[in-house]
Amino acid sequence: MTGWLGNAYLWVKAAHLIFVIFWMAGLFMLPRFLVYHQEAVPGSPEAAVWTEREHKLRSIILTPAMIIVWVLGLMLAAQRGLFNGVSGLGWLHIKLLLVVGLTGYHGYIAGYSKKLAAGKEALTGRQLRLLNEVPGIAAAIIVILAIVQPF
């Protein structure tokens, strides 16, 4: 592969995919943690344990993985010519839009985790379970766009 990444392209792509997996794992886990946390008695030792787990998941896995995904993804997008006006990258524009959406979702559930830790419950367990489907649907569409590149 030629371009500014040169022979590092495949390594950057592999690292990007590895951190996408970490990020997605966190996006699947945190809403599930929130369901269990919300079902615990507020102020109980169990609720405190869930607060700590959520904090560790956010700070050790979820947010660092998201940042790395963005950095490596933008490097790959630059390699493809996204910032040089290369045509035929409609699929990449949609993919990036979905990743922006996942980033917003990440921020929302991380914020809700902090609210729940403060005792401010706003969603039902059913709503949290439904929210847990968002990253799976987005990931399926993103994979199809990246592999098939339909437009």
Image (cartoon, rainbow, N blue to C red):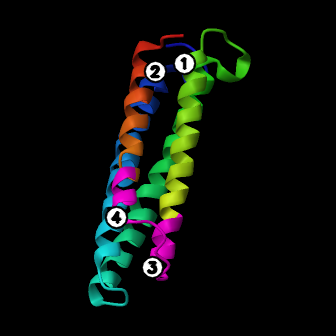
Going from the N terminus, do you reach mark 2 or mark 4 first? 4
In the rendered structure, which amino acid carries the disc numbered 3?
Ala
Residues at marks 2 and 1 touching, judged by CB atoms closer than 8 Å: yes
Residue found 49% across the figure and 70% down from its top: 122
Foreground disc of the pair 4, 1: 4
Residue receiving disc 3: 117
Residues at marks 3 and 1 touching, judged by CB atoms closer than 8 Å: no
User: For the stretch drawn in magenta, what is the main secondary structure?
Assistant: helix
How far is mark 4 from mark 1, CA to CA?
35 Å
Residues at marks 3 and 4 touching, judged by CB atoms closer than 8 Å: no
Residue receiving disc 1: 91
Name the element at disc 4. Answer: helix
Name the element at disc 2. Answer: helix
Assess whether residue 99 is covered by the magenta stretch: no
Report whether 64 appears left or right of 28. Answer: right
Residue receiving disc 2: 145
Foreground disc of the pair 3, 1: 3
In the rendered structure, which amino acid carries the disc numbered 1?
Trp
Q: Which residues are magenta?
A: 111-130
Q: Position of residue 73 (x, y in %)?
A: 53, 34
How far is mark 2 from mark 4, CA to CA?
32 Å
Going from the N terminus, do you reach mark 2 or mark 1 first? 1
Q: Position of residue 8 (x, y in %)?
A: 47, 27
Residue found 43% across the figure and 56% down from its top: 62
7, 41: nearer the viewer? 41
Q: Position of residue 93 (x, y in %)?
A: 61, 24
Residue 123 figure quarter:
bottom left
44, 7: nearer the viewer? 44
Q: Position of residue 82 (x, y in %)?
A: 65, 21
